[in-house]
Image: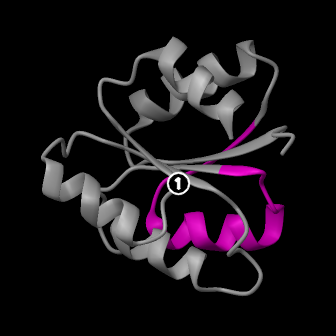
Amino acid sequence: MSIKKILVVDDSPTERHFLGELLTGAGYQVITAESGEEGIAKAKSERPDLVLMDVVMPGLNGYQATRTLTRDEQTKNIPIIVCTTKGQETDKIWGLRQGAQDYLVKPVNGEELLARIAAL
């Protein structure tokens, strides 16, 4: 799968900036969303090749947004990598059960993230 356009869903302006800079520098087109609800809307309208999803957000959390995207006909084929501070093994298992392809714990290592994207 060729990944060109990535949607970053995170309520933290710092994280959106960090991931945006990292991904843009690696040649990806980046779209951002500040909430689970906005992430779902942008995934449907922008049709990204990948979603990077935070978990802890106001309103719809990342687990709920991931579940919504992976069960929707329009968005079910878009891979999702969860990027979150929630680092317990049960958190990771739950994230993958919601349909995420991969799970990274913040602070995200830029090289590792780029390698995981390249491996998709």
- Residue 1, given in percent of the width and then of the height, sits at 83, 45
- Residue 45 lies, in percent from the top left, at 80, 70
Was residue 40 drawn as part of the magenta stretch in this picture? yes
- Find numbered disc 1 in the image and state the secondary structure of the residue it sits on: loop
Res 56 visible: no
Q: Is residue 15 left or right of residue 119?
A: left
The way the protein has been coloured in the rendering is one colour
Residue at the spot x=46%, y=77% of the render? 67
> Which amino acid lies under the numbered mark 1 shown in the image of this protein?
Gln
Where residue 47 sits, quadrant-wise, is bottom right
Q: Is residue 110 left or right of residue 77?
A: left
Relative depth, front residue between 31 and 64: 64
Picture layout, residue 52 above or below residue 38: above
The answer to which of 87 and 44 lies nearer the viewer is 87
Check disc 1: other Cα within 10 Å, few if <14, some if 14-19, many if 20+: some
Question: Residue at the location (15% across, 58% down)?
Answer: 90
Is residue 106 toward the left or the right of residue 74 in the image? left
Taking the spot 70% from the left edge, 28% from the top edge, the residue there is 118
Does the image show residue 86? yes
Which residues, given as a range, are shown in magenta?
A: 30-50
Please tell me whether residue 120 belongs to the stretch shown in magenta: no
- Label 1: which residue? 101
Q: On the picture, is 21 further left or further right than 24? A: left
Q: In what quadrant of the picture does the C terminus appear? A: top right
Question: Percent from the top left, x then y, of residue 49?
Answer: 78, 51
Residue 109 image position (x, y, % from top left): 41, 17
Does residue 106 sit above or below 22 in this rendering? below
Q: Is residue 71 above or below residue 80?
A: below
